[in-house]
Amino acid sequence: MVKLLLILIMISGDMKYWLIKSEPDTWSIEQQEKNMIEPWDGVRNYQARNNIKAMEIGDLCFFYHSVSQRKIVGIVEVCSDYRLDPNDETMKFGLRDMKFIKKFSRGYSLDEVKTHPLLQDMALLKQSRLSVQPVTDVEWNVIMSLVE
């Protein structure tokens, strides 16, 4: 397992990883899968906005169902440049399009994140209300090794 993690870390290159949250009643991984590409809009927090701005085309994001499910349920890919959110009257917040990549068969719960020793510094635990957050290479690879 350690060998696999080291290989995954070495091949990750310059790609950045993220976690984006949605309440499944508002937008779910199933809807994302059906539509394939959708704008990730509605963010109204400055730190989350800055994270969206920092994303690059090709970056991968864990798709997290918040509130009722509280688990990582799949992966989407950033597939557009940053642009203003047309639904934001203040013109301060933007969005990026996300492309469906994969739905996990079982997902990875918040409780599992809380108990894994290599995930204790994850933004998901430290800034639990932040809707768009960075994920380190190690965190990404640990979770990927556990959901596949």
Image (tube, grey):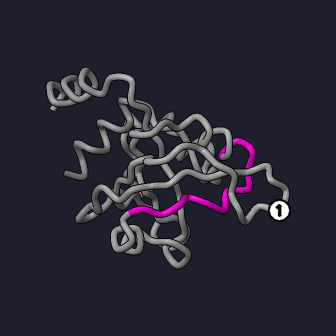
Kindly identify the amino acid type of the residue bearing the numbered disc 1. Answer: Glu
Horizontal and vertical percent position of residue 90: 85, 56
* Quarter the N terminus occupies: top left
Up the image or down, 19 lies above or below 70; here it is above
What stretch of residues is rendered in magenta? 37-48
- 1 vs 25, left or right, is left
Residue 133 visible in the shown view: yes
- 98 vs 12, left or right, is right
Q: What residue appears at the point 22 percent right and 42 percent down from the top-left corner? A: 145
Q: What residue appears at the point 39 percent right and 43 percent down from the top-left corner? A: 60
Residue 113 visible in the shown view: no
Picture quadrant where residue 71 is located: bottom left
Horizontal and vertical percent position of residue 30: 36, 73
- 42 vs 7, left or right, is right
Camera-side residue: 127 or 136?
A: 136
Q: Residue furthest bottom?
A: 25
Q: Is residue 46 magenta?
A: yes
